[in-house]
Amino acid sequence: MTARVSDAPPPPSLPEPATPPTWSVWVLTVWHPEVGLPVDPVAVLAVDTAADGAPATYLSWVPRTYHRADPWRERLAEGVTPEHLARWQDEEGVCAMAPGMVAPDAVDLRHAAEIVMDGLLAEVIPYLPTAETRA
């Protein structure tokens, strides 16, 4: 006996997105003297704005950037609020923030931030010019 089309099991439905739409990832940068722009990454900030009040956050610092990251440490000491995020995105100068891509397979904010950090450490930071490479 052959199975009819109507007897076939229904096709699997598409899985729901793994990461909530309220998650965002930001690459925090500071002034890079050799480039003359705030493009030196010092941290990755993952944010979930779903909760009322202050958003849930996870921060991952680039290793060995403690003093260069001071401007961002001062800003983050104010706390992370939707208003601060909006203001920081609009400000220009020594600090900047650029949106990162939230990996669809990230299981939590920490994982989302660390995936972006891994990309920075492997593909961006090694190729930024330094005073030694300019000479």
Image (spheres, rainbow, N blue to C red):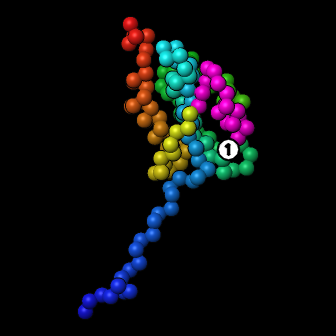
x and y percent of residue 129 in the render?
42, 17
Q: Of all residues shown, which one is farthest toward the left?
A: 1
| Left or right of residue 86: residue 2 | left
State which quadrant residue 44 falls in: top right
Q: In terms of depth relative to the viewer, which is nearer, 87 or 62?
A: 87
* Res. 55 image quadrant: top right
Question: What residue is pinned by disc 1?
Answer: 55
- For the point 56% across and 22% down, which residue is it? 38
Q: Is residue 3 above or below residue 102?
A: below
Report helix, strand or loop for mark 1: loop
Q: Is residue 113 magenta?
A: no
Query: How far across and down, in percent of the image, does residue 64 sit?
Result: 48, 21
Q: Amino acid at mark 1?
A: Pro
Would residue 31 be seen by someone viewing this image from the given angle? yes
- Can residue 71 be seen here? The reply is no
Which region shows up in magenta? 80-97
Judge left or right: residue 125 versus residue 98: left
Q: Is residue 96 above or below residue 81?
A: above
Give the image location of residue 13, x and y in percent: 45, 69
Q: In the rendered view of the protein, which quadrant contains the N terminus? A: bottom left
